[in-house]
Amino acid sequence: MGTPNFAVTILAGDFQNGSMKMIASRPLTRTQIVGGKTLATINFTLIFAVFCLIASFVVGIAMFGLGSGYSVITVFNATSVMVMPAWAMLLIYFASLMLNIIFYIVLANLFSVIFRSSILSMFLTFVVFAGGLLLNALFVNATWFVFTPYAYLDLFRFFGGASATGAFLTFGVTSTQNVWGVFAVFLGLVVLLDIV
């Protein structure tokens, strides 16, 4: 949720402090301004995520060695079972996670442009994120759930990565207490940042 917060402050913050008027006075279209800010956020996130990926590889090699004995059994798109190296599965997970993060960046920017309020945009982005966690945890086995957009936000499950309990993104939230705990922490941070 840090990346959408960064995206919200880039756009809605410019609207709130009045610097968007100065940016809009340049010979750029609104699409170019919003698109440039969105691409800047995606680039920042990608660079940071690649740094974290390299760090996890280094820590993994330091702890477990460079042996080729670490394999993962995976099911691709519910049709074929295969054994692949753990590092390859990590790269697939990284790619699917980046697509999910890009979705939330674009959603946060959409809310920022529509409402022009940092707190409201971040709150709505979090509601969509927490709603996805909660719905995936509670209704993953319901037949009607496949007709909702939340059923397909977890792209990693198409590559053998989702559990039957409704894992979503990096969290395996299986109870509503975990979702409400995350919500309470987020709400506390928003109030704290608003006071500061």
Image (spheres, rainbow, N blue to C red):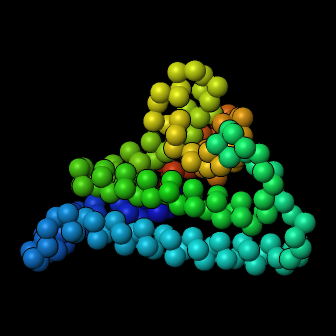
Q: Which residue is found at the position 45% from the left and 36% from the top?
A: 149
Q: Which residue is found at the position 9% from the left and 76% from the top?
A: 27
The image position of residue 74, as x and y in percent, is 76, 49
**Dividing the picture into quarters, in which one does residue 162 lie?**
top right
Is 111 rendered above or below residue 6?
above
Image quarter where the C terminus lies is: bottom left
The image position of residue 73, as x and y in percent, is 81, 51
The image position of residue 51, as x and y in percent, is 60, 77
Compared across the picture, whether 21 is left or right of 6 comes to left
Q: Residue furthest top?
A: 143
Q: Which residue is found at the position 38% from the left and 45% from the top?
A: 124
Residue 118 appears anywhere in the view:
no
The image position of residue 120, as x and y in percent, is 33, 49
Q: Which residue is found at the position 74% from the left and 74% from the top?
A: 57
Q: How many marks?
A: 0
**Dividing the picture into quarters, in which one does residue 178 lie?**
top right
Residue 51 appears anywhere in the view:
yes
Closest to the observer, 128 or 141: 141
**Dividing the picture into quarters, in which one does residue 133 lie?**
top right
Compared across the picture, whether 113 is left or right of 141 comes to left
Q: Residue furthest front?
A: 80
Closest to the observer, 114 or 62: 62
